Amino acid sequence: MSNFLFYTVSGVALGAVYAIAASGLVVTYTTTGIFNFAHGAIGMFCAVTYWQLRVDWGVPTWLAIIIVVGAVAPALGIFLEIAIMRGLEGTSEITKLVIPVAVLLALNGLATWIWFDDPTQVKSVDPFFGSLSTVSLFGQHLLWHNVIGVFVAIAVAITLRIVLYRTQLGVTMRAVVDDRSLVRLNGGRPDRAAMAGWAIGAMAAAIAGILISPLISLQVLALTLLVVDAYAAAIFGRLRSLPLTFAGAIVLGLLKSYWDWFSAGGTKWPFLQNFRNAVPAVLLFVVLLALPQDRLRGAVVSRTRESFHVPTVRQAVAWGVALIAGIAMLQAIVAGPDIITLEHGMALGVMGLSLVLLTGYAGEVNLALFSFAGIATIAAWQFDVGPGGNALTTSLSVPGLAIATLICALVGGLVALPALRLRGLYLGLATFAFAIFVLNEVLLQSDQLTFHQLGLKFHLDLFTGGTLTVPRPNWFGVDFHASERSYLMLLCVVFVLLGIGLIALRRSAYGRALAAMKDSPAACATLGLNVTRLKLSVFMLSAAMAGLGGVLYSAQLRTVSGANDYDVFLSLGLFMLVVIGGVGYVSGAFLAGVFGGISFAVLGSLFDKLAHDYASFEPLFHFGGKFSTLLGSALAGIFLGRNPTGVAQQIMDGFRPLARARTAVGIWIAAEVALWVLSWQGPLSHWWFAIITFVSVFVVPRIIMMRYPDRFAAELGRPAPSDDDVPLELVGLARPFTEADRELFDAALSIAASTEPV
Amino acid sequence: MTKIVGVEIVEHEPDPAPLIELVGVRAGYGSIEVLHGVDLVVREGAVVALLGPNGGGKSTTVKVLAGLLTPTAGEVRLAGRCVNGTSADVLARLGVCTIPEGRGIFPNLTVRENLRMATQTGTRLSRVEETAYARFPRIAERRNQLAGTMSGGEQQMLAMARALAVDPAVLLLDELSMGLAPLIVEELYELVAQVASEGVSILVIEQFARTVLGIADTAAIMLSGRIAAVGTPQEIEQQLSSAYLGGSHE
Ligand SMILES: Nc1ncnc2c1ncn2[C@@H]1O[C@H](COP(=O)(O)OP(=O)(O)OP(=O)(O)O)[C@@H](O)[C@H]1O
Ligand SMILES: [Mg+2]
């Protein structure tokens, strides 16, 4: 009985914190329609700011709380609303998912930069009034901190109730949900309501972050994930009902606490030792499945104007050959660690291809890419190396890879099957929950598992020891283990083959069915397409591709750590990068690899090199290096993620008209080759070559167009010269006079341009 | 002031100044243009009825006037000043009160909270409530009910109550009658006439042509994004009987 009381009370205390976090999420969502994926990161950021004030600078606790909750958090929320979220109204659901993800990554990067540069330094915060101050209740000794948490949750609930129902601002916030434009017709300001929504959301995240921080040592990812746990409660409240959200939070807290009780703190069943941290994810998954879909708001994906241009297979082959040639040229001029950087980017590109299929072609979402990579890696490792095997002397076999891919397809099917009716945000959350589950139950499973079943005893190794050494293939007589250059080429060829395959698939009847499903699942169903089978198959196919890419990614890293190399945040990041690159394009996945694996890493190392070479500017270059490695891709996401068709299409749109200036393009290519030779022979550093090439892709088309203004009038946004077909004497009759005509006449008649209108 | 295309009618008194004016306004949704150059004037204290077949662009005109839609060409003038691109909430606070098509209420807010939303133009809540409940005792009984659960007529009364309480300079009414019984429609338009007599300029869009023509000073017919005719209610009524406009539900 006393145990029951103890765990119930702790559960309620934990649930109180979740309730605060979740209510903030709900308030933001209802007033703005944006599910704030960055909620956890905001909570983390505020918790660390609190540590900074209270522990590092010795500010009194009450003052630190006032500063963080009353100033830092609302300022952060309002800043995010004005600078970023305001522009998201009316954008596609994918964009509304990607931008908050980018904000999450940016906040995590920023916190890492400011506070966690030195991983050995442990930061921790004491509970309020210290860890010894307890109060007795029902014969239980409770930490004051937890008691305060419960009271704070009650206070938050009452405050929210009063603000939302008794104040003009709150009534406006609720009215915005009903009818945004009617609020404006009433003279209300929906923008202010949105700002208030973000400010309140951030304040709730901050309170939750502060309350939760004494439970663990402060770490960016762990803290972020703890607040992420509250997502389950928010979904329980259907993202709209605060009382239900509070109920869900208490249920969640109790479940977690009772699990601690039943599993004796996780020691009872070794294979479930980390299950505690997966409880919220499991609950999230279950709640998502149990709620009727029509009750989930925003479940209908708005039709967006994005339209992807599908190349022909022949074009794809041509581009593929060009890419292989380009990589061959590039790998001739780079060496050592830079090859590995290129490999890394290429491997990410291969993984990204699975998102082109799933999100770009079929309109579905998967935020668990790296979980599939992890599962596939374990499978391939089991097949080819096995416990006690030596990865260095074995090689990755085709059957091993095939089995890993197959297993991913099956797991993908298992995840997708219950989640088939979910779309957009909710599918994203379901896959995210799956990722957290896999992280805790598979990737962090560092002990060998022993089962006694049916009188048999067998062992299972998942990530025994925490790391795996993954073999590389030895195919076609090439030892990819020994030669990084060959492995780079292998990745490149795999990328090209998969890419061509994808384009062929998109052009097939199956691909057209996918496109139709993306536009309107309901219409598809009425047309007699089996949407269920279609969705399931594309999910399995894409999971298989993620697995295939994942094994190659792991083999590229050679030694992988279950805790770090398949992080849920990596999945979020890659999803974001593919969307930036252009999720409807194979080249979008390639660009994602370039962004994620190469560009910011290269910029970072370039800055480091500069800092080394020019010591007097060291702080500046050091800043630049940190900036690009920690924040680069997240900021790219924030600024570029809004473009629904991605950078790939932008680049292609820049190229397409160039067919009208073949000579100039020829000169450009010749100049590139000349630069390459320079670089090959030594004088030009290969990274400068890469940077010049990369920049020229964006800049040169523009320069060529400006050079021939009359040929590219339309692209340059000038009136087409065809207007001047009208003979001079008929101007004014055949078409109205323009300013240009007047100038022309004035010049021809040598009249000083008059300023008065004629 | 009145003019059927081509025919001028000589006026003796100087016209009151135009309060709202559309000059060559083009507007649309995305790449689709719906209004192809609309000219319309509502003078101070006048009631203008805008009639026309479904899809003619009447509601779009109201959206442009209310500031919900920015014209791509032409000018929207309020009291002589160009207000292109001024946002709807600013216009509302300047005294342009719009009751949009459908029900101009917040269904998930109570009646009281709906009235509270009307206070953003500067009127105190107690005054808004007083005015509203005095005009519509039926609403007073339901002040704590969710607006969405009231009957259609009651909802429209609530919408009207807001319009009356805020003392607007201009009232834009888009199909007050939608889905209402004729008796309630009559009742609502009696109120509109009363408001008009207090000097508020009103643009009213309606399918019940007879009812509005009775209270209008001027009427206009809108056909596929253009004003096809402007005239006195009598003149327009004659034109109505020749062209089908779905106007005379009797
Ligand atoms: N939000 C929108 N997006 C795209 N097109 C729209 C939108 N709203 C209206 N339209 C189109 O604009 C045209 C004019 O619509 P509008 O609502 O102004 O007509 P109306 O004269 O008010 O018709 P009704 O008498 O049926 O209310 C219609 O063809 C309609 O399809
Ligand atoms: Mg209409």
Image: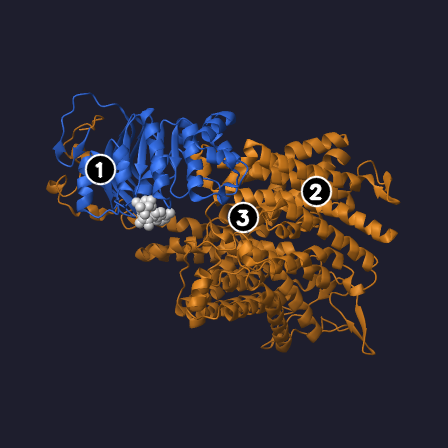
B141 vs B189, left or right, is right
Secondary structure under the numbered disc 2 in the rendered image: helix
As measured in the structure, the alpha-carbon distance from the residue carrying label 2 to the one carrying label 1 is 63 Å
Quadrant showing the C terminus of chain A = top left
Residue B24, picture quadrant: top left
Q: Going by the picture, which residue comes out furthest to the right?
A: A139
Q: Residue at x 16, y 24 (%)?
A: B11
Q: Is mark 2 within 8 Å of ligand 1?
A: no
Chain to which the residue tagged by mark 1 belongs: A
Viewer-closest of A244 and A200:
A244
Decide: is A623 above or below A648: above
Q: Are marks 1 and 3 on the same chain?
A: yes
User: Any idea which chain is the blue one in this picture?
Assistant: B
Q: Is residue B131 above or below residue A22?
A: above
Q: Which residue is mark 1?
A: A740
Q: Position of residue B111 (x, y in %)?
A: 51, 37
x, y percent for residue A485: 58, 65
Residue in the foreground of this view, choosing between B148 and B191: B191
Query: Residue drawn 20% across and 38% down?
Result: B236
Residue A314 sits above or below residue A187 on the image: below
Q: Which residue is mark 3?
A: A99
Q: Colour of chain A?
A: orange
- Mark with earlier residue (2, 1): 2
As drawn, the label of residue A272 is none
**Type of amino acid at the residue the image marks with label 3:** Ile
The residue that disc 2 covers is: A209
- Mark 3 falls on what kind of element? helix
Q: Using the numbered discs, state the Cα–Cα distance from disc 1 to disc 3 in whole angstroms.
A: 44 Å
Residue at mark 3: chain: A
Residue A206, position in %: x, y?
67, 39
